[in-house]
DNA sequence: ACACACGGGACCCCCCGTTGTT
DNA sequence: AACAACGGGGGGTCCCGTGTGT
């Protein structure tokens, strides 16, 4: 899947390298200079597109956050607890696999989380997501299992397993997560019967 | 319950606030000035105890890394795959619960990981730990489940669930992890014999 | 009553907002970006009219400086000392009242003064003006009274007294200045019977 | 009056050069680099004493503002209008003559005024001072004369008349100001021997 | 066992000015 | 007549580390 960096518009290229560098060095550890260097432009050119570091971060995370919001809302509309949990789980894993570095950063970088909590209703979104997963098991086990699954998925798509195939990863993440949450696999075998 | 900040030796207080600030702001986002301010001393005083920023980080992580190394070595000496996995799992969760903020940082902060990879054989240690967990399930599922469990535990002891009781947390983490890995609970109820 | 910003030519609107912003933030504290923003255009559009920041400043001050030069020259042609002083005084106050913000800047902003001294013979003009006023009282009192009057008038038309009517202001400034300089009011009541 | 820069503490030397440079280039036009260069130190050393530009500015103006406040309060306690006016006038002129550059900046630099209005009750102080002078002449003339006198004194102690002797300047400023305000010189020659 | 003073350097923001396009 | 894109550079802030003095 050659990411065709041939001639994407500069703004998008900025977002792409930003994600990569945030993943490699954390948000606080990534300077605009590093980002500019990666593209062979100057800091001033970056400033032309994003007037603050925060603005760049928001541009980076907004699309993914929007997808996540949609998933959570769709899931909340389901009728049974297990259906709701299945919905967020598959949706979240799908996003995580498609935006591997970004989800890792979103879930674990304190600098990012702080900034998002201030600007967006990020904390609220995460809590709703957690609740949907936690509800499959009432009692103390619920929230903890949910936290483990979310953090686990986010961590597993990080730099550690970069060379695992996307489809394999998606299927396996689904399996572990279901086991962890005590969810039975749905009747229709979901098709993606990876090897 | 602040662990007796009444009159601990300054060196230890430095390490403690360092962990807290690393958790809150990531390593790259925490300056020596912030640490010094938190204790009401000057930066120069910090330099009296640690000759460089890196040295402070090492002092912070070394005890935990030593414990982790011991656990991994003990586990590797076990005879069956499940015994080995059970061993690392219980040991790691115990450490994670007792050093909540620190494990979170150790597992997810790229700045910390980079520095440790350079100075210590950190990567090797993590890989051995992962392998012990991954071996319970041959095939592609093994490594992925192991990564999810480790990242999940590390994430769950982070800032999200600060107000969960330590013992409850430990037991629940064990349960989810076993389910995720497909480990049956051992005959002897494992008895939470934390020190 | 905003002087018909309805559809003045852009060039003039640029000059107007420039004066206002120079008054509010000083010359050094006013960027082309601020000026462009105020008009809802881009910086590049400003450069369409003025090739440099300095050129904009000159365009702003030139008309007023020309008027001032004319007044000084006219005054210098008068026969008596008091006539010369009366002439500059009324002329200067008239300009000051009609270009309130600008005179304030011209008289007190070091950045502006520096630039004008380099490009125009600004210092010379001011000195001639001062001399005409100073000559009414030989001895050390002359130059000092003249300086006080000029600075006083320039300061009084600044942001402090924005809401005073133009005609009242003109008349009162004339009165204080005459008292300060020890000038008797001329026989012909000068006409400007304010309000 | 050789200002004995031989070996004053760095902090005070910083304040002194700051005043001088603010006078020469306006506040917005003076960079910390310029200040540091003047003392042969680095910007970082300046930061050691003043963590923001604003902090430096406040340290510069605070002593003078305190003196001015004392004068205004003392004047307000007088019984007759003319006594009150005489009091502020002599007090203000004394401060102006002793801190020539600074008073010029305080009275005319918009950048400074903005910052002080935000942090201190600067506007209030100036208004009280103006009122004390304005009250000697009811009607529209009062406030305008007061504004002219204050701005005039502040402008006259600026860079224009640097080479006038301090005592001469003080006496002449008093004279012009009294004439401008219509104040008769007090019976006791006022003895300008301010400590 | 600390504080004071300072240097060197990096980072973010932002400014002035140029070029190319519409 | 106006904008989009960008370079070169400077300003303010702040960081890491050192030296010196108690």
Image (spheres, coloured by chain):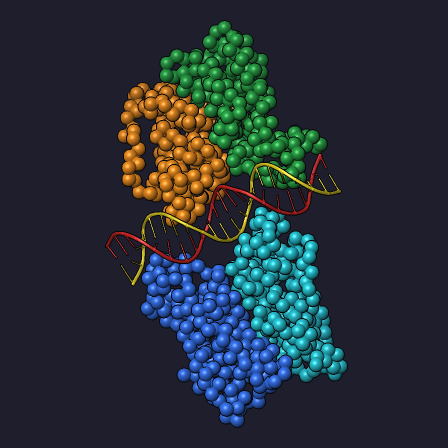
Chain colours: A cyan, B blue, C green, D orange, E yellow, F red
The residue closer to the viewer here, A18 or D167, is A18
> In this picture, is C83 found above or below F14?
above
Q: Quadrant of residue E19?
A: top right
Q: Position of residue C3 (x, y in %)?
A: 65, 29
Tell me what residue is drawn at x 46 percent, y 40 percent: D31
* Quadrant of image for the N terminus of chain C: top right
Quarter of the image for the C terminus of chain C: give it. top right
Q: Residue at x 48, y 36 (%)?
A: D29
Residue A83, above or below C29: below
Please tell me which residue is depicted at 45% across the width and 64% down the height of the picture: B21
Looking at the image, is C96 positioned above or below residue B53?
Answer: above
Q: Residue at x 57, y 54 (%)?
A: A37
Residue B145 visible, this angle: yes
Q: Nearer the viewer, residue D98 or D146?
A: D98
Q: How many marks?
A: 0
Please state if A114 lies on the left or on the right of A13 as rendered.
left
Position of residue B179 measured from the top left corner of the image (x, y, whole percent): 59, 84
Nearer the observer, D47 or B71: B71
Residue extending farthest top: C79
Q: Is residue B24 something that shows in the picture? A: no
Q: Above or below — where is C127 with respect to A43?
A: above
- In the image, B149 versus D77, the foreground residue is B149
Residue B89 screen position, x and y as percent: 51, 82
Q: Position of residue D65 (x, y in %)?
A: 39, 37
């Amino acid at each position: 899947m050659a990411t065709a960096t041939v001639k994407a518009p500069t703004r998008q290229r900025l977002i792409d390298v930003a994600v990569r560098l945030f993943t490699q060095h954390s948000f606080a550890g990534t300077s605009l200079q590093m980002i500019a260097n990666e593209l062979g432009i100057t800091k001033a050119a970056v400033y032309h597109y994003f007037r603050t570091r925060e603005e760049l971060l928001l541009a980076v995370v907004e699309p993914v956050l929007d997808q996540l919001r949609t998933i959570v809302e769709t899931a909340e509309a389901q009728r049974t607890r297990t259906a709701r949990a299945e919905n967020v789980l598959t949706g979240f894993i799908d996003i995580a696999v498609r935006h591997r570095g970004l989800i890792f950063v979103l879930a674990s970088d304190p600098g990012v989380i702080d900034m998002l909590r201030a600007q967006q209703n990020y904390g609220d979104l995460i809590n709703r997501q957690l609740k949907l997963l936690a509800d499959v098991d009432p009692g103390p086990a619920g929230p903890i299992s949910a936290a483990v699954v979310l953090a686990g998925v986010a961590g597993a798509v990080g730099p550690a397993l970069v060379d695992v195939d996307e489809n394999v990863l998606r299927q396996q993440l689904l399996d572990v997560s279901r086991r962890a949450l005590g969810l039975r696999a749905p009747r229709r075998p979901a098709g993606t019967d990876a090897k």
